[in-house]
Amino acid sequence: MKLTVTSVEIKNIKANALVLFLPKINSSKIDYFQDLPLFLKKKIELLKSSKQLPEKSNEILSLFTFDESKFEKLIIVGLGETKNINSEIIRRAASLAAKTAQDFKSIKLAFYLNKQLLSSDTQLNFVSKISQSITEGVMLGTYNYNKYKTSKKKASIQETIFKVDKKFQNEVLIGSQIGRKISSATILARDLANAPGNEIYPETLAQAIQNSAKLYNFSATILKKDQIEKLGMGGIIAVSKGSSKPPFFAILEYGKDFIKSGTTVLVGKGVTFDSGGISIKPSASMSEMKMDMSGAAAVIGTFKSIATLKLKTHVVGLIPMVENMPGGNSLKPGDIIRHHNKKTSEVDNTDAEGRLILADSLSYASKYKPKVVIDLATLTGACVVALGHHATGMMGNDQNTMNELSKAGDETYERVWQLPFYEEYESQIKSDVADVKNVGGRWAGAITAGLFLKKFIGKYNWVHLDIAGTAILEEKSYYSPKGGSGVGVRLLTEYLMNKNK
Ligand code: BES
Ligand code: ZN
Ligand code: ZN
């Protein structure tokens, strides 16, 4: 998508649709749009007097325009009270506008950011945040996964134009470029998650990682089955046994030059399809489990985002990739596995496979002497039961990083919610025959899964994010589609950018 920032007069802008954002105005007279051209001002006065102007946030009015205008459409979106305006309200408003424009096949969309909006007293600290949020709303809101649709498709927005006062031009441009990089990385994560299991399996996911590494300038090393075996990663090998597709393990690295200021390791669950294995899942909604590599997708997307933004920070990504299938050679309930750190686990349920491959990966992470390790995994249905689709479950041993992630979550609206991580829950995963058991019974399943992982971490600060509910969406809303949400990319990018400041 092309981004243009301009200060020319509205009548000289070439776009199919013009978008105006309108906060709630208390006075009866609108001077809000004082710098609008007369014909638009008149129109708005008219709408105001007939009480048709949208003012609440997410209210939208779209009109075919009239004589003097070259725009086919005028789209007005309400923002609500000025003091409540934040980046989420802007993202939602922009996505509403963009979706409306898309329905009318408008491919060039102009946002008029008037002085009053850019200098009013909102919760947005920077003008650049407004254009970042608008770009995110447009790109993420008009996304749909249509690769396999033979007859396409909705029109895509090819150009977003920002009409601003000269003094804001530079900041608006910077913000919109940040927004475009982060959105396109989120879209990569969505595309990977939404891709079917016959397209994305461990080998092809590894190839996708290598492609991204080349395109966006980070490094990727792919370990094959024999190397995984040699490293003693018994969990990854065990889970892959039922599948005809061999496992892979990817190591991504960005920003080696900044190693002195500490390393962040990101670990992503890469189960390309989770049938449950011998403990097979019911067939209803089993197809969703093509998205059981959403943790991996979030890590890959985050690498794209931080590499294109050129953040000054050292990040390592670890991605174990397997397909979990039943078969004559499958892992079975009762089997005992030895993991990378030599600890053993008893497999009581082959559908609790994510923790088995993450155990090896978390243990391997010690090698990088990381300052912090963050793992992302569609780990438990229990987390979806607890939190639904609007919050990621968070636990770990490092309150400081959890607080930073909370803050990044509130800003990006990829919100996280900390779960209790009491040691009393640990008795549920005690095994009679091995060091730990891979399931903890009916209660607090998200927490016992986290406590299983904790047995395999090294001496480092660690946070576990259970994205089972937030990565896989049952319905679309605002700028999130049904299916893969790409959750994690915006959260981690924001978190890493904040640390970078
Ligand atoms: N991938 C699933 C978790 C999941 C469920 C993700 C629904 C997204 C939506 C995971 O591997 C799994 O099957 N977990 C089991 C664990 C149980 C056997 C202890 C679960 O949650 O049912
Ligand atoms: Zn499973
Ligand atoms: Zn799974």
Image (cartoon, rainbow, N blue to C red):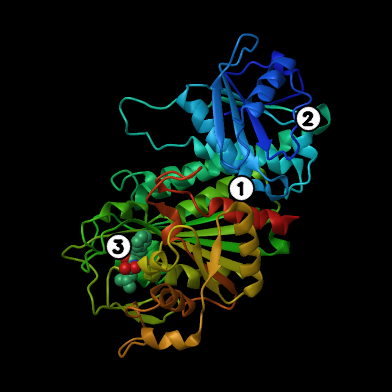
Q: Secondary structure at mark 1?
A: helix
User: Residue 452 in the image: x percent, y percent?
Assistant: 42, 78
Q: Is residue 237 something one can see in this rendering?
A: no
Which label is found at residue 88?
A: 1
Q: Which residue is mark 3?
A: 240
Do the residues bearing badges 3 and 1 touch, measured as CB atoms within 8 Å?
A: no
User: Residue 314 in the image: x percent, y percent?
Assistant: 65, 57
> Could you tell me the amino acid type at mark 2?
Asp
Q: Residue furthest bottom?
A: 432
> Could you tell me the amino acid type at mark 3?
Ser
Instruction: Give the crowd class for mark 3: few <14, some 14-19, many >=20 residues within 10 Å.
Output: many
> Could you tell me the amino acid type at mark 1?
Glu
User: Residue 277 in the image: x percent, y percent?
Assistant: 24, 64
Q: Which residue is mark 2?
A: 31
CA separation in Å, label 3 and label 1: 41 Å
Mark 3 vs mark 1: give the one in front: 1
Considering only vertical position in the picture, is 345 above or below 112? below
Q: Is residue 153 something one can see in this rendering?
A: yes
CA separation in Å, label 3 and label 2: 65 Å
